[in-house]
Image (cartoon, rainbow, N blue to C red):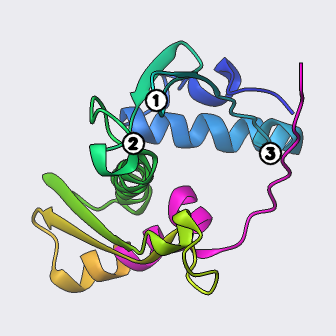
């Protein structure tokens, strides 16, 4: 398994009709030559600081994470569940753009909002019957463009089938944790 590489992300300008179309074709070509090209690994690492804050590095990027004062933080950055909502929204935007291009649909603008309901009893261990994560997340995507509402509804159906972060939210993903004590 490799990280995202140039074979998958560099479109051929001689055949690309759009930037995303070129990426879609380059990826399709690379995977058709060797299915191993479809498997990629993303990594991140975190370093704790202050009361409950952390710096997370993902590739060449870094983000700060904190909690509001009610959860022990200084509210200097979004908290983990807010980042989850941000990841979901940004993945929806990307997936809408890719699939609109793939299906030949025009989108002029995309905006999205998400809100999630979380009962802190699960996190604090006050009620073991309450899960520590979101009980429900609601996403609203607003599209503008020349296509009919029916065509955009078809696009939404395809996006909801192919959005990786929506998939992570809807389906159990095996996660194995390892504790190392130094």
Picture coordinates of residue 119 (x, y %)? Answer: 42, 75
Q: Earlier in the sequence, mark 2 or mark 3?
A: 3
Q: Are marks 2 and 3 in contact (CB under 8 Å)?
A: no
- Identity of the residue furthest to the front in this view: 126
Task: Give the residue pinned by disc 3.
Answer: 32
- Residue 51 is marked as 1
Q: Is residue 71 left or right of residue 108?
A: right
Task: Give the residue pinned by disc 2.
Answer: 72
Q: Nearer the viewer, residue 88 or 119?
A: 119
> Which quadrant of the structure image shows residue 50?
top left
Picture coordinates of residue 62 (x, y %)? Answer: 47, 18
* Quarter of the image with the C terminus in it: top right
The boundaries of the magenta stretch are 156-182
Q: Is residue 142 above or below residue 178?
A: below
Task: Measure how far apart labels 1 and 2 are at the Cα level.
Answer: 7 Å
Q: Earlier in the sequence, mark 1 or mark 2?
A: 1
Circle 3 SS class: helix
Q: Residues within 10 Å of mark 2 (few under 14, many from 20)?
A: few
Picture coordinates of residue 171 (x, y %)? Answer: 66, 74
Task: Measure how far apart labels 2 and 3 are at the Cα level.
Answer: 50 Å
Q: Residues within 10 Å of mark 3 (few under 14, many from 20)?
A: few
């Amino acid at each position: 398994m490799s990280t995202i590489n140039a074979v998958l992300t560099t479109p051929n300008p001689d055949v690309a009709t759009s930037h995303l179309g070129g990426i879609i074709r380059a990826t399709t070509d690379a995977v058709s030559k060797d299915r191993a090209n479809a498997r990629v690994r993303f990594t991140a690492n975190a370093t704790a600081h202050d009361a409950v804050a952390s710096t997370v590095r993902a590739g060449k990027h870094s983000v700060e994470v904190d909690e509001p004062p009610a959860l022990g933080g200084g509210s200097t950055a979004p908290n983990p569940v807010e980042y989850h909502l941000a990841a979901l929204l940004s993945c929806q935007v990307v997936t809408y753009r890719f699939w609109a291009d793939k299906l030949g649909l025009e989108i002029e603008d995309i905006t999205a909002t998400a809100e999630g309901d979380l009962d802190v009893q699960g996190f604090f261990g006050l009620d073991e019957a309450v899960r520590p994560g979101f009980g429900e997340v609601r996403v609203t995507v607003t599209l503008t463009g020349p296509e009919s509402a029916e065509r955009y509804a078809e696009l939404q159906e395809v996006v909801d089938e192919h959005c990786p972060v929506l998939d992570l939210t809807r389906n159990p993903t095996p996660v194995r944790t390892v504790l190392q004590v130094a």
